[in-house]
Image (cartoon, rainbow, N blue to C red):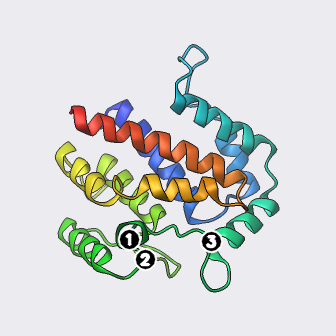
Amino acid sequence: MVLAEDRARAGVYGLLASLFYSPPTAQFLRDVFAEDIFDDGVPETRFVSAWRSLRDAMRTADPAAIQQEYDDNFIGTGRPPVFLYASHYLSGSVQRTPLNELREELAQLGITLKRTSFETEDHISALCDVMRFLIVGEETAPPALLEAQRDFFMRHIAPSYAPLCSAIVEAGGTDFYKKVARFAGEFFSLELQSFDIA
């Protein structure tokens, strides 16, 4: 049985996976804005504030502008201004040892990423997808033990999320994704603290 708290964690990972994988559609923005994950009485922590800032941005966002922002900053022509690949922040480039180690670990976990793009497994959206899967499992696979969740997070997200999120926030051409990055950074920091305590 998956606890409500873990379903909420998995939901945030799923949201981040979607936002980092591709720019959101108008329908996606409406659906997410319609659901507030916090009650009105929740204390205004940095995480709560980052969520509400992102949610407000979703309310007024122009999907075409977000598409352009995503393309300009994360796709681009040649070298993009911001890399969304964890390996880049671990080794300084993609396609080196961290990515190979990740692929071996995914194989050991029996995880095959079902992707229709050419993104590598160390793309932040893919890493969030794996964490979501480890937390809630699926019909043919039970949730992973907390130790397995902690190990994957500590090896593949914890060392790279701060420089990745900082790169997005500091990029000159980001607006909507600054708020995504701040929310992601606060969430990952909470995960790190929780794993340290558990």
Q: Is residue 168 above or below residue 119?
A: above
CA distance for labels 3 and 2: 18 Å
Sequence-wise first label, 1 or 3: 3
Query: How busy is the neighbourhood of tag 3: few (under 14 within 10 Å), some, or many (20 plus)?
Result: some
* Residue matched to label 1: 87
Q: Is residue 18 above or below residue 195?
A: below
Mark 2: amino acid: Thr
Residue at image x 48%, y 77%? 119
Dot 2: element: loop
CA distance for labels 1 and 3: 16 Å
* Residue matched to label 2: 120
How many numbered marks appear?
A: 3
Sequence-wise first label, 1 or 2: 1
Q: Quadrant of the C terminus?
A: top left
What x and y, as percent, mark residue 135?
31, 47
What x and y, as percent, mark residue 52?
64, 32
Asked whether the beta carbons under mark 1 and mark 2 sit within 8 Å of each other, the answer is: yes
**Is residue 138 found left or right of 48 in the rendered image?**
left
Residue 123 lies in quadrant: bottom left
Query: How busy is the neighbourhood of tag 1: few (under 14 within 10 Å), some, or many (20 plus)?
Result: many
Mark 1: amino acid: Ser
CA distance for labels 1 and 2: 10 Å
Dot 1: element: helix
Residue at image x 24%, y 73%? 101
